[in-house]
Amino acid sequence: MTPTNKKNFDFRVIGAGLAGSEAALVLSRAGFRVELIEQKPQKFSAAHRLPGAAELVCSNSLKSLDPHSAHGLLKAELQALGSPLIDCGLSSRVPGGEALSVDREKFSALVSKEILEQPSLDLKSEEVLNLPEDGIPTLIATGPLSGQSLMEDILNRLGSESLYFYDATSPVVSLESLDLDYFFWGARHNPNSSDYLNLPLSKDEYLQFREDLLAAEKTPGHLPDEDLKYFEGCLPIEVLAERGQDTLAFSCMKPIGLKREGQNRAYAVIQFRREKAAGEILNMVGFQTRMKWGDQARVFRKLPGMRNAEFLRLGAMHRNSFINAPRFLSDQLNWKSNAKTFMAGQITGSEGYSEAIATGHYAALCMMELPLLPENTAMRSLVRFIIHSDEENFQPMNFNFGLLPELPEAAKIKGRARLGKAERKALKAERSLRELDQWLKDNWENLSRPSSSDHPWRRNFLKTLTEPDEAISSDWQASI
């Protein structure tokens, strides 16, 4: 589709979260006139507090940049496509080991600045109560906390009830309020790193902490007698504690790779990650909780070194709604019943920050009527899962290598030996990027120029690709 020169907008995006901001920027950078509607700062959901775009509500981590991980591949594809939000994330990065951890306020400010500086992007602050019916192709990216009126209008048009799960946030604590004699700095795979602050617990301390979690008063669901469904990839710590005595010690509190010099390995470890580059504010890693606030403070202050802990934010639970995507969406992420209405982000049933950015970018490409991304790419595989899952048992999922198509059987054999898991993942990643590279060559003229940011992790990831031939833009060659 070619951008129009009319006064009317070519596209509309509702919601300036991760998916909506990504889509709006991709479309406007390609020369289209875009209307972006966001209810903040006029109205905030129960979980939002920043006035700007792309607010990270739960963790401040967009997960791994390791090129051999699932999320590393997803980010490599997004970076190759010129993702505005991944660039903003890299520009607001704070220490976090191999993860892309960001200063959430700086990240939101950078994305907001990008939006405001786009001449063909018009930002409007108002709550959308009903979907417009003016024929403008519209992307709904209002997230899992969509306003009640809009969600009811969407569901009425689809003739469906929403699906849901409960999610929670982790506490944030002041570094200077902790007694650092009980803590040590270090990352799981790099003991000399200062990316994480670690609190080791003995078996007795761990068991007492688990008992305190189980005894604490919990926040009830939003509706009386509602089943508290959770996303398995982001369970509250109380739910993990209920599943078994050592479940926490084998999940978010696992001690593997974390040992204080001169001491034996702890039975369990609580990790704290920096919220800002200076490190004065720390997030309790994996400690999303639905304990009532009074009990949160009481339980956590019983931990060693945390008697005087100052909590700058306590954890909170919220209800996430999403649609039955396999029933209502096509491979272009638009409605089967209305091809001009698209959806992206967590409202589709994708789960995770990088996944939200990916579905927003994917939807923007589809709105521009470009060919679908190749079958073997991470982004296409993520959307394929969303669209072609069992609609009777559809549940959100993060991207993982299991969603990528299998390698041909011959590719799994090297000599007489069968390739290991890591080698198969590397081959899948290389295949994905090769196919995306060819797709970019084939569709170059219809895309805006990708960012020329040269980040070492991306350069290392792409080094296995063949050199781009002369047919590809010299600008693109310079960018990789």
Image: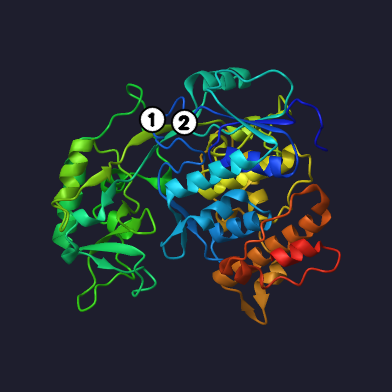
Callout 2 crowding tier (Cα within 10 Å): few <14, some 14–19, many ≥20: some
The residue at the far right in this view is 471
Quarter-of-image position of residue 335? top right
Q: Which residue is pictured at 63% across the width and 69% down the height? A: 459
The mark nearer the N terminus, 1 or 2, is 1
Q: Secondary structure at mark 1?
A: loop
Location of the N terminus (image quadrant) = top right
From the viewer's side, name the closer residue of 151 and 240: 151
Percent coordinates x, y for residue 271 in the rendering = 30, 59
From the viewer's side, name the closer residue of 419 and 74: 74
Q: Which residue is pictured at 62% across the width and 22% down the height? A: 158
Q: In screen coordinates, is 374 left or right of 38?
A: right
Callout 1 crowding tier (Cα within 10 Å): few <14, some 14–19, many ≥20: few
- Tag 1: amino acid: Ala
Which numbered tag is attached to residue 145? 2
Which-is-in-front pick, marks 1 and 2?
1
Location of the C terminus (image quadrant) = bottom right
Quarter-of-image position of residue 24? top right
Percent coordinates x, y for residue 172 in the rendering = 30, 48
Q: In screen coordinates, is 335 left or right of 198?
A: right
Percent coordinates x, y for residue 364 in the rendering = 69, 40
From the viewer's side, name the closer residue of 261 and 115: 115
Percent coordinates x, y for residue 190 in the rendering = 38, 73
Query: Which residue in the protein does label 1 denote?
Result: 46
- Tag 2: amino acid: Leu
